[in-house]
């Protein structure tokens, strides 16, 4: 669903676990068809922010707007409808261990589409081939490697051609070739299907290759300390913490 | 959803080639035409090339991509060259990505129905493997026990105390409830029959003997199998999934000594104590029923038990409880360490631990009872 409003609009977001504030006063927008990168050191709250964006955690304060709809003021049905249009790749793949790879991809297709069995099988085959796992339909997650599980998780995330894809550390655990293919795939999803992609990542090569826009979270200041396209950020920022991160210096 | 293929594509026969004109929206929601008629047509005329005209193509999603992938694969099999450069750039790139990593040879599984003999064979092999695993586990356990006797077993006493707390005091509430009720049921069932002969006072013998010799230990063991044995299997199974067990092994620390031993010792220590407590609560339950239904005072009831249920029966029950403790801990830990690498495997390990424990408890009880008969106690 394409509207004039940004795809994601985060306003004055504060994230906390009980009394412990993780990040506060977070403000940024993600436009349609943009690859947006959330950067920051370990433990700064990147994955927690992602959990807020995908609707798994309710903000302590502030709002998350998806296509102009406030996620946490919408009715439960409306929120579920919005969330079902998300594709999420979790750090470890988060495949359902009692199902084969094909069954993992089948479940969202049978729940949210009218495809017949033959079409579902074709989609499974196509999605698995996109992530380099053609022929692994009948394997259980416990029978494949960590990197393969991650790629299968991506195939499941893409099953319904979601409007927006959230990737939590997509390159972690992947070999360089798979990592490059994943970057290509992210760019193609953006260019060909107009998908919006939000990525939490540490991988500098990947960040500079795919990132259209980004924010940098700091665990000490507990808020965004830099934002902008990653390549420009590298040239323009004066903040030593961001420079250290983007240039891998100490 | 029935789709009119003519609305989605037109086949134009050219000299030695075919032009496929795609039109309209190609999305799953708007329906994707069946590819079979097109494939049959291509096979019947066997063109040298297939090209595409996408000027009338509207919006599209994976529906179009799956259609094209099937079409291109079929063309490859029939030696028909597909001119993918005639497709829009976005589609070309996605096709390239989907064909970038060819299917690994031998990766695809052919799932065939298994003959009955093969199934029996596989089950037998699995049972043999299980038996070997169990023997290995018991061997390691004995080895660990020897190390423990020599003061060389590597485990933390804080773990042992924690496990004793989990298995002992934390289980008192459920033991109280179940034992009290079992004692009351025994007394009630006995009372109905004994009243017929005016022998109500023997309810005390029935409850005292039943709880001391059998039910105290048995009920405690079954509760602990469902409560603590299952917890051991789930804990160790989850550690297996998270590679924590592997981490112990690679550091040269025996998981048997470090993880199993504290749990085993905890149950060996707590089960007899819980059994004594269960005996007492069961006898109390019987006392309540005797006092309320049969007008037997507490004093008469306990005097009857003291006179007719000698300490040897309590000792047999306590010894049984110790044996059951070993069995529950062994089954729970064995199934946990045997667990696979997935969440469903943890569930299977837990179920299996409880079933194994209960079977072993009943078998052990039968053996001990026969042994007691043989030695006359």
Image (tube, rainbow, N blue to C red):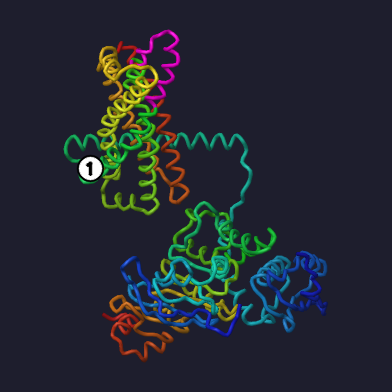
Q: Residue furthest top?
A: B197
Residue found farthest to the bottom:
A236
Q: Position of residue A88 (x, y in %)?
A: 50, 68
Left or right relative to B64: residue A81? left
Q: Is residue B276 magenta?
A: no
Q: Is residue A184 above or below residue B123?
A: below
Question: Which stretch did the figure color magenta?
Answer: B182-204
Give the image quarter of residue A171.
bottom left
Q: Is residue A67 left or right of residue A204?
A: right
Which residue shows up at 59% across the image and 82% down it? A3
Q: Report the residue marked by disc 1.
A: B161
Which residue appears at 55% of the width and 61% of the height?
B104
x 45%, y 10%: residue: B196
Mark 1 falls within which chain? B
Q: Residue B197: horizontal and vertical position, in percent? A: 43, 8
What type of secondary structure mainly makes up the magenta span? helix
Is residue B192 found inside the magenta-colored segment of the image? yes
Identify whether B172 is placed above or below B58: above
Above or below: residue A221 compared with residue B291: below
**Viewer can see residue A130:** no
Against A114, residue B6 (above or below) is: below
């Amino acid at each position: 669903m394409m509207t004039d409003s940004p795809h994601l609009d985060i306003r004055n977001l504060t994230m906390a676990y009980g009394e412990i504030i993780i990040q506060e006063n977070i403000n940024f927008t993600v436009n349609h068809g943009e690859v947006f990168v959330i950067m920051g050191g370990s433990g700064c709250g990147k994955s927690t922010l992602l959990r807020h964006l995908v609707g798994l955690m309710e903000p302590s304060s502030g709002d998350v707007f998806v296509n102009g709809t406030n996620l946490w003021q919408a009715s439960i049905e409306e929120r579920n409808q919005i969330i079902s249009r998300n594709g999420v790749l979790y750090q470890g793949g988060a495949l359902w261990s009692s199902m084969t790879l094909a069954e993992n991809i089948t479940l969202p297709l049978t729940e949210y589409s009218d495809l017949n069995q033959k079409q579902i099988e074709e989609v499974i085959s196509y999605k698995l081939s996109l992530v380099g796992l053609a022929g692994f339909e009948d394997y259980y997650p416990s029978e494949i490697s960590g990197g393969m599980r991650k790629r299968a998780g991506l195939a499941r995330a893409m099953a319904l051609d979601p409007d927006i894809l959230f990737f939590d550390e997509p390159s972690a655990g992947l070999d360089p070739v798979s990592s490059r293919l994943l970057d290509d795939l992210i760019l193609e999803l953006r260019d060909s299907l107009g998908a919006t992609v939000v990525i939490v990542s540490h991988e500098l090569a990947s960040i500079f290759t795919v990132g259209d826009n980004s924010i940098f979270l700091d665990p000490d200041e507990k808020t965004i300390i830099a934002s902008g396209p990653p390549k420009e950020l590298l040239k323009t920022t004066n903040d030593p913490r961001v420079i250290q991160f983007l240039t891998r210096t100490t | 959803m029935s789709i009119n293929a003519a609305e989605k594509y037109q086949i134009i026969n050219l000299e030695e080639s075919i032009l496929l004109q795609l039109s309209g929206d190609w999305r799953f929601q708007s329906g994707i035409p069946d590819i079979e008629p097109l494939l049959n047509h291509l096979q019947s005329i066997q063109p040298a090339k297939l090209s595409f005209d996408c000027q009338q193509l509207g919006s599209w999603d994976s529906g179009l991509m799956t259609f094209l992938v099937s079409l291109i694969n079929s063309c490859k099999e029939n030696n028909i060259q597909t001119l993918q450069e005639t497709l829009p750039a976005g589609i070309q790139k996605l096709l390239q990505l989907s064909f970038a990593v060819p299917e690994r040879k031998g990766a695809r599984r052919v799932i065939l129905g298994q003959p009955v003999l093969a199934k029996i064979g596989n089950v037998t092999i699995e049972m043999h493997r299980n038996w070997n695993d169990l023997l290995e586990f018991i061997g390691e356990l004995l080895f660990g026990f020897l190390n423990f006797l020599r003061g060389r077993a590597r485990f933390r006493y804080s773990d042992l105390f924690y496990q004793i707390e989990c298995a002992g005091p934390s289980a008192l509430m459920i033991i109280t409830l179940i034992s009290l009720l079992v004692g009351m049921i025994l007394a009630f069932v006995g009372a109905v029959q004994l009243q017929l002969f005016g022998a109500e006072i023997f309810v005390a013998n029935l409850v005292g003997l039943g709880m001391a010799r059998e039910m105290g230990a048995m009920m405690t063991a079954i509760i602990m199998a469902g409560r603590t044995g299952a917890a051991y299997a789930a804990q160790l199974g989850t550690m297996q999934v998270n590679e924590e067990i592997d981490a112990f092994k690679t550091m040269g620390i025996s998981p048997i000594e470090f993880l199993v031993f504290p749990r085993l010792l905890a149950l060996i220590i707590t089960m007899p104590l819980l059994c004594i407590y269960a005996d007492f609560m069961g006898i109390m339950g019987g006392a309540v029923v005797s006092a309320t239904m049969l007008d037997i005072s507490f004093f008469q009831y306990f005097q009857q038990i003291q006179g007719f249920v000698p300490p040897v029966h309590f000792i047999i029950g306590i010894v049984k409880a110790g044996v059951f403790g070993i069995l529950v801990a062994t089954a729970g830990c064995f199934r946990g360490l045997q667990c696979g690498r997935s969440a469903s495997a943890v569930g299977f390990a837990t179920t299996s631990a409880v079933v194994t424990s209960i079977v072993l408890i009943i078998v052990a009880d039968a053996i001990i009872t026969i042994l007691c008969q043989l030695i006359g106690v």
